[in-house]
Image (cartoon, rainbow, N blue to C red):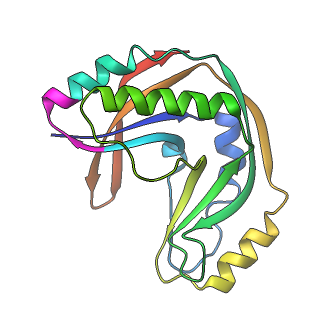
Amino acid sequence: MYRLFVAIDLPEEIKNAVGAIAGRDLIGARWVPREQLHLTLRFIGDADEKIYQAVKNELGNVRGTPLSLIMKGVGHFPQGREPRVLWVGLEESAHLLDLQKKIELSIINAGVAADERRFSSHITIARLRETPFAEVASLEGMQRQFTAGPFPVEEFYLYSSTLTREGAIHRREAAYRL
């Protein structure tokens, strides 16, 4: 059984910029390790060998244009007073939205149910547990002007993820050029 997702990797300079936010003293924050920072285009979840092979093959049919992305701002999910995820956002990109839609269609063609959630381009930088809203709001306020990039995107990846007590271990299963 595989636990799959499709993502764009971040270049080192972007990881460094995002990493400057991570590690701050924030109650209840479990920071994403720098080497695992990525932009998820589609979380697939559990897949057997047949679905894994179908997804891997269908993603090979995705055609897109190389693009450039800019990181911008810091926020949290869900909106409201009980934040669970701290993220860095991206400037709007029609090319990124087009790529994500093509990936979604290819995954549906592979036999996976459509994602019911609307795509939101972001980089998860921490998972939060019982973190006071005021602390999250303060960090967001300090990082309101955060930007990094632009950085080029010329490929995307299919990853598998294994959950362990120490956190997730990601393994690149396939690469796809734009």
146 w.r.t. 156: above or below: below
Asked whether residue 162 is drawn in magenta, I would say no
Left/right of residue 36 with respect to residue 171 in the rendered view: right
Residues in magenta, as a range: 45-51
Q: Position of residue 163 (x, y in %)?
A: 27, 53
Q: Is residue 113 above or below residue 172?
A: below
Give me the residue at 29% from left, 42% from top. Answer: 113
Q: Residue at x 61, y 67 (%)?
A: 76
- Give the total of numbered labels: 0
Of residues 125 and 70, the one drawn nearer to the viewer in this rendering = 70
Say if 162 sits above or below 130 in the image: above
Residue displayed at 80% across by 48% down = 147
In the image, farthest residue toward the right: 145
Q: Quadrant of residue 64?
A: top right
Residue nearest the viewer, comparing 81 with 142? 81
Q: Position of residue 156 (x, y in %)?
A: 50, 25
Q: Position of residue 105 (x, y in %)?
A: 41, 29
Q: Nearer the viewer, residue 156 or 20?
A: 156
Q: At 14% from the left edge and 36% from the top edge, which residue is drawn?
A: 48
Residue 168 percent location from the top left of the image: 34, 51
- The answer to which image quadrant residue 111 occupies is top left
- Left or right: where 96 falls relative to 137: left
| Residue 130 in the image: above or below residue 29 | below
- Quadrant occupied by the C terminus: top right
Q: Is residue 36 left or right of residue 75?
A: left
Q: Quadrant of the N terminus?
A: top left
Relative to the observer, which residue lies in front, 155 or 78? 78
Q: In the figure, is residue 108 to the left or right of 93?
A: left
